[in-house]
Amino acid sequence: MAFTALKRHGKTMARLRSIGTEQLPAPRPRYRRGFTLIETALATVIVGVGVLAIVSAQQAFHFKNNWSTHASTATLLGNEIREMTLSLPRHDPVNGLAYWGSEPNELWVGDFDDVDDFDGDGGGLIFSANLGNGPINARREIISNMPGWTQIVQVYNVDPFNITSIQPDGTTDLLRVEVVVTYQSPMDSTPREMTRVSWITPN
């Protein structure tokens, strides 16, 4: 009889377990969620745009840095010519206004003894690394290791009452000197004007 009661109790417990199992839903398996294709593509686009912005800013920085370096070099080359001519008289001490430009016996820049000599035959003088005669410093020496640089010197007669008014060569006693400095890098097809320096001769 005790065995029967125990058996009946076991069946009751099994029924209760089955009822509890039916009432409680089975737990769903949990999966680890990763990035979707859209999220991955969006992240790639954001990173790509950021990298391109950094590269573009770096290129702009290098361009501006090179330009400022070249501009300061050009200003230095222009002022070298100015310093060279400041102590010279306007016209030849012997011939005066009778002869414009360099005299026949003045064959190179070391022979020039007045400002109008720097206008050559009236069309200006060119001191260029490509020509092998420049650029030059205030001591009339060729500056080495400056490929692509050129100094173009022109001397003008100007109206004493209007220095912006250019007069024919040798017609006035007031001179204006202008130096245009250009630079042509290996990547440039033509020279670029880097600076233009001009002044009125004091002597």
Image (cartoon, helix red, strand yellow):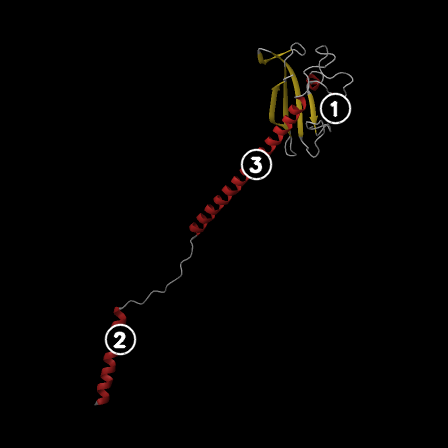
Percent of width and height locating residue 37:
44, 52
Q: Nearer the viewer, mark 3 or mark 1?
A: 1
Mark 1 or mark 2: whose residue is earlier in sequence: 2
Quadrant in the rendering for residue 70: top right
Query: Which residue is nearer to you in this view: 181 or 75?
Result: 75
Q: Secondary structure at mark 2?
A: helix
- Is label 1 in a helix, a strand or a loop? helix
User: Residue at label 3?
Assistant: 65
Residue 85 x/y as whole percent = 67, 21
Q: Is residue 190 visible?
A: no
> Where is 84 relative to 169, above or below?
below
> Which one is closest to the eye, mark 1 or mark 2?
1
Kindly identify the residue that appears in the image at 27 percent across and 74 percent down: 18
Identify the residue under disc 1: 110
Q: The disc labelled 3 sits on which kind of residue?
A: Asn
Q: Label 2: how many residues lie within 10 Å, few (<14), some (14-19) or many (20+)?
A: few
Q: Quadrant of the N terminus?
A: bottom left
Q: Nearer the viewer, mark 2 or mark 3?
A: 3
Can you see residue 149? yes
- Examine the rendered structure and indicate whether residue 175 appears above or below residue 133: above
Place of residue 138 in the rendered image (x, y in percent of width and height, measured from the top left): 68, 27
Q: N-terminal of the two: label 2 or label 3? A: 2
The residue where tag 2 is placed is 17
